[in-house]
Image (tube, rainbow, N blue to C red):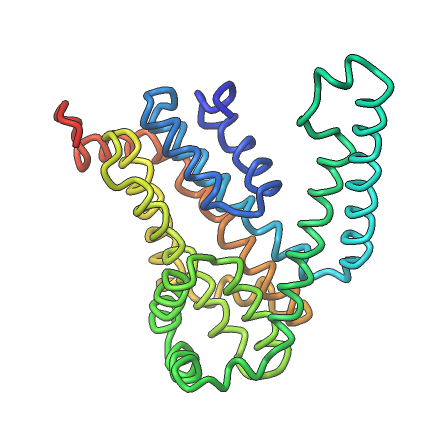
Amino acid sequence: MEKYLARPGAAFVVAILATGLLHSSSAFLALLVGLSGSGRVPTAAALGAILGANVGTTTTAQLASLPTPKMLFILLGLGLFLVGQLYRHVLWLVSRSGRTKAGTASSPATFGLLLFGLGLLLLGLEKLGSAARFASWPPLARLLIAAQASPLAGVLTGTLVSALIQSSTLLVGILMGLVAAGKLGLPGAVAVIVGANVGTTADVLVVALGAPAPARRVAVGHLLLNIAGAVLFVIFPGVLVRLVVRQSPQRAVAWSHTLFNLSGILFWPLLPSMARLLEILVPDNGKER
């Protein structure tokens, strides 16, 4: 990450890959906040990485919307992990070099854990999405009814719920099940997804509290970029819905999540100007608390 985050273009690509592997934009952005706080990532490049992280975090929903062999991932991952652990212990018994590597994980075991975790994550999202009765919980039911009143109401609902549960991906998984069960219309779900991208900035803002000014600029930039995208959606709410309406319910929800975050590229020419604006909004006064 540190090697390729110096330029916006490279940072955008690295952020997509890293966030897709981590299955969490918050995890990647927490790392980005730390690197920016140390002065090793320019603000404009960090903004490019934010746009990439927004796209990369949609990978999980895309996988969950496909007929993915989730149990195969879990079983194959567990098998690779056990084989890797067995190989490491055998190597420790028969080789001196194996003793010098004691405590380190082998590549098959590490890859097995990756597959195992991915399978569990996708299985959890599937079970959560299929539990459409979750929508009958009175507070959530009232929020969902309110979300369908207008695009702005849906965006505000998504912002609130995502900030509370600290995950836009989790909310998208819930919406897949609700749309498939007919509990929520696609336009309302798309508006909630747009709001979820704003609400998910809450944890990054908390991470940046008390951090140096460059790190706080990343958190504020994340918020401003997602708010700008939400404003565009409220102005042109029908565009995104028309692009995904022919898909199956789960695929429509997943693609609306991806396409909305891809639309952040529209702000690419403004990144240098936004970086200068952030330097004004979050000045570095030389005092660290």
Looking at the image, which is closer to me, 221 or 97?
A: 97
Looking at the image, which is closer to me, 125 or 272?
A: 125
Residue 264: percent from left, percent from top: 45, 45
Q: Is residue 68 above or below residue 150?
A: above
Number of on-image labels: 0
**Residue depicted at x 77% and y 41%:** 81
Q: Quadrant of residue 119?
A: bottom right
Residue 90: percent from left, percent from top: 85, 27
Residue 266: percent from left, percent from top: 43, 43
**Residue depicted at x 68% and y 57%:** 120
Q: Is residue 49 above or below residue 42?
A: below
The residue sitting at the front extreme is: 93
Q: Quadrant of the C terminus?
A: top left
**Residue depicted at x 45% and y 27%:** 8
Residue 102: percent from left, percent from top: 70, 23
**288 relative position to 31: left or right:** left
**Residue depicted at x 49% and y 45%:** 25
Q: Is residue 41 above or below residue 69?
A: above
Q: Quadrant of residue 210?
A: top left
Looking at the image, which is closer to me, 19 or 270?
A: 19
Q: Quadrant of residue 165?
A: bottom left
Looking at the image, which is closer to me, 76 or 54?
A: 76
Q: Is residue 96 above or below residue 277?
A: above
